[in-house]
Image (tube, grey):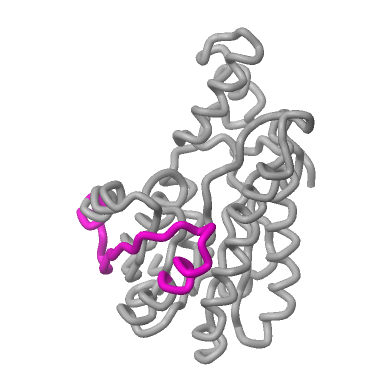
Amino acid sequence: MDLGLTGKAAFVAGSSKGLGKASARELAREGANVVISGRNEAELQRTQAELKETASGRVEYVVCDVTKPEHISEAIRRTADLFGTVDILVNNAGGPPAGTFDDFTDEVWLQAFEQNLLSHIRLIREALPYMKKQQSGRILNIASSSVKQPIPGLIISNTLRTGVAGLAKTLSLELAPYNILVHTVAPGRIATDRVRSLDEHRAEKTQQTLDQVRKQAEEGIPLGRYGEPEEFGRVVAFLASEASSYLTGSTILVDGGMIRSL
């Protein structure tokens, strides 16, 4: 299937590794021109070189710390300067620390709020003028399966990810007249460094081995395994494409059936 992404201009936040990188890879593979971003320039350069090996579109990068408004403004401006506009915005940021309510101060909560929710708001604000002008666009917010079912020991993530889903659903209604489609993409157990780190944290807390923690998690997934990053990236590419033109306001679980609710 031709997804119709050739020549589309995409900005992917937090894309030097993990789910952001996987999303950028699939967008570029399908012909989109992609700007990847992150805080570490050396890491971005390595990722750019890797993505170019399979890309049909261009892959550029910009150093961007999503907790800094000036970085966000420059990143979106750079994307538009390179490719003429912004057709696709993928919001993504590293997850907040694991822990329970008593573990965190106001400072930690505020830092996580800025990184995992306010950054999305700021990126959308910067990208919207381009999308409204051309009467089309895609905004994809990477969150977590915790928007459907809270994950024990991840109270900050559980709180902020549901805010992302609420933001996306409300924006989908406001932006539909401009043909700007908005979704939340909610990964379950995808084999990334972040999930490995969470598994290590759980192993330490429960005095289990890492293998035991993973096996226990896999037993709760109907497909019986963790997902691969490219499987997640392909969902993002579909939602960013013309093939999804009658979808908006959805929360798409990419979790192997882990969440059992309707």
> Could you tell whether 228 is left or right of 118 in the image?
left
**Residue at 58% of width from left, 72% of height from top?**
124
Q: Which quarter shows the N terminus?
A: bottom left
Looking at the image, which residue sits at the far bottom? 133
Quarter of the image where one finds residue 237: bottom left
- The spot of residue 77 in percent (x, y) is 41, 78
Q: Which residues are magenta?
A: 50-75
Residue 146 seen by the camera: no
Task: Give 175 or 66, whichever is nearer the viewer.
Answer: 66
Residue occupying image coordinates x 74% and y 37%: 155
The residue depicted at 31 percent of the width and 68 percent of the height is 31
Q: Is residue 160 magenta?
A: no
- Name the side, left or right, on which 5 lies relative to 129: left
Look at the picture and state if 27 lies above or below 134.
Answer: above
Q: Residue at x 53, y 64 (%)?
A: 239
Percent x, y for residue 138? 54, 72
- Is residue 208 visible in the rendered image? The answer is yes
Q: Residue 59: within the magenta?
A: yes
